[in-house]
Amino acid sequence: MAADFSLRILTYNIHKGFGYTSRLTLADMREQLHEVGADVVFLQEIQEEHSGRSKKHQEWPIEGQLQYLARGFWPHYAYGKNAIYNAGHHGNALLSKYSFARWENIKLNRLPMFSRGLLHGVIYLTPIKKPLHVICFHLGLTQHMRNWHAHRLCEYIRGSIDPNEALIVAGDSNDFFQKLSHHFDEDLGLKEVHKHLHGFYARSFPSLFPMLALDRIYVRGLEPVESKTLGGRQWYFLSDHLPLYSKLKWTGD
């Protein structure tokens, strides 16, 4: 069973549920995400509360964006509240078809408006009875901040996760100049899925004319099988990023 087990993964910066205009795109986003049907979804910039937008947009979900997107498809989910402001807050999220044994949100810095975090979940993979560590990240906009966040991420993984256990680290790297690879490849022995399969990082930003490779999926203990950005008119206007999708094969016992 273990040798044949595979996982479908998707990471997506949803831009707080808005595209390039003021139109709330959550309903269309939910439809497309459900159609893809990934086993585990890593979301960035998910806005769980905003007093102004919830009043302005009649279709704003009462239960919050996370439960709205997960409802009917992913029974297990977790939210890491990072950026906090007077109107509300946003952060990272994990959606999973498999239950979480545990999860926690680790703050990378403490500035309320610009706070970033790592959302770490441990998923119990019932078909193979093995744990899978999943970490959703969203790194800073400046090179100095990205370096600091990547360093903290590596420190956390080394100190908290058994190197023999399977790991997926995915999210928005904001690595405009592709200077962070040594943190993940050399320091932790992770494979970036798209680069491993195609020789280059996937271009996913901006969604209308994707030129920058910001979104990444790194793995350990899993073998990359497929990787692609999801494009087409159904995705171009939902967010400022395109989703990055991958299929991974279990390589453990």
Image (tube, helix red, strand yellow):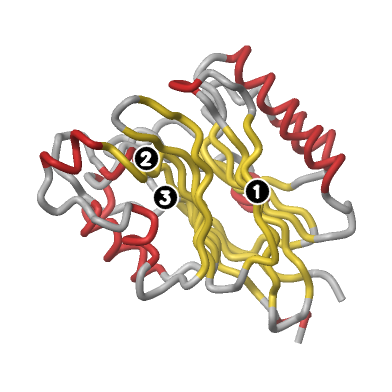
Where is 227 relative to 48, above or below?
below
Q: Nearer the viewer, residue 62 or 204?
A: 62
Residue 116, image x, y percentages: 55, 29
In this view, the mark in front (1 or 3): 1
Q: Which structural element holds mark 1?
A: strand
Which residue occupies 65% across, 48% down?
104
- Can you identify the residue that label 3 sits on? 243
Q: Quadrant of the C terminus?
A: bottom right
Q: Quadrant of the N terminus?
A: bottom right
Pointers 1 and 2 in contact (C-beta within 8 Å): no
- Can you identify the residue that label 2 sits on? 241
Q: Which structural element holds mark 2?
A: loop
- Can you identify the residue that label 1 sits on? 104
Q: Mark 1 or mark 2, which has the lower sequence index?
A: 1
Q: Mark 1 or mark 3, which has the lower sequence index?
A: 1
C-alpha separation, residue under disc 3 versus residue under disc 2 = 7 Å
Pointers 3 and 2 in contact (C-beta within 8 Å): yes
Q: Nearer the viewer, residue 110 or 227?
A: 110
Where is 238 relative to 211, above or below?
below
Q: Amino acid at mark 3?
A: Pro
Q: Is residue 85 left or right of residue 248?
A: left
Which residue occupies 49% across, 43% down?
92
Q: Is residue 28 left or right of residue 15?
A: left
